């Protein structure tokens, strides 16, 4: 359920005054990233590390493409799903060549 206009106004005024107890996690820079964002960043870092291990250094094009797909998969929605699907296809093609 969406917040009421009164609550949003109170939250805004408190934030402007430097009081962040009403701020929403993940939206206020003073509170830092919320737990979900941290987990997503950690998962993306693990995926990028796996890509670096999977693709050899001499295949710079495939490696760069795979890392770009990892970046695109960070988001939400159909574009992120398609990026992960494409990354899977790229990995499968890479393994077929080996």
Image: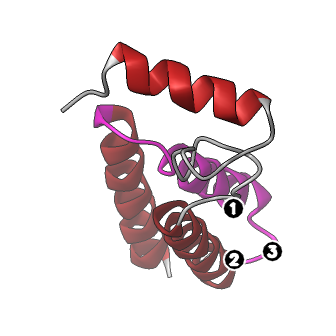
Q: Position of residue 42 (x, y in %)?
A: 59, 75
Q: Residue at x 55, y 31 (%)?
A: 11
> On the rendered structure, is 67 left or right of 58?
left
The circle drawn on residue 86 is: none
Give the residue pinned by disc 1.
63
How far apart are labels 1 and 3 at the CA level? Answer: 7 Å
Q: Are marks 1 and 3 in contact (CB under 8 Å)?
A: yes
Residue 33 falls inside the magenta stretch: no
Mark closer to the chain start, 2 or 3: 2
Residue 72 falls inside the magenta stretch: yes
- Range of magenta residues: 56-78
Residue at the farthest top position: 5
Give the residue pinned by disc 3.
57
Q: Residue at x 50, y 65 (%)?
A: 40
> Which label lies toward us, 2 or 3?
2
Secondary element under disc 2, as helix, strand or loop, is: helix
Q: Nearer the viewer, residue 82 or 45?
A: 45
């Amino acid at each position: 359920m969406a917040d009421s206009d009164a609550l949003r106004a109170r939250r805004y005024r408190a934030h402007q005054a430097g009081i962040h107890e009403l701020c929403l996690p993940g939206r206020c820079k003073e509170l830092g990233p919320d737990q979900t964002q941290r987990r997503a960043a950690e998962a993306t870092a693990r995926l990028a590390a796996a890509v670096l291990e999977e693709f050899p250094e001499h295949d710079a094009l495939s490696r760069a493409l795979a890392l770009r797909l990892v970046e695109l998969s960070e988001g939400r929605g159909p574009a992120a799903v398609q990026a992960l699907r494409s990354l899977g296809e790229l990995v499968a093609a890479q393994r077929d060549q080996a």
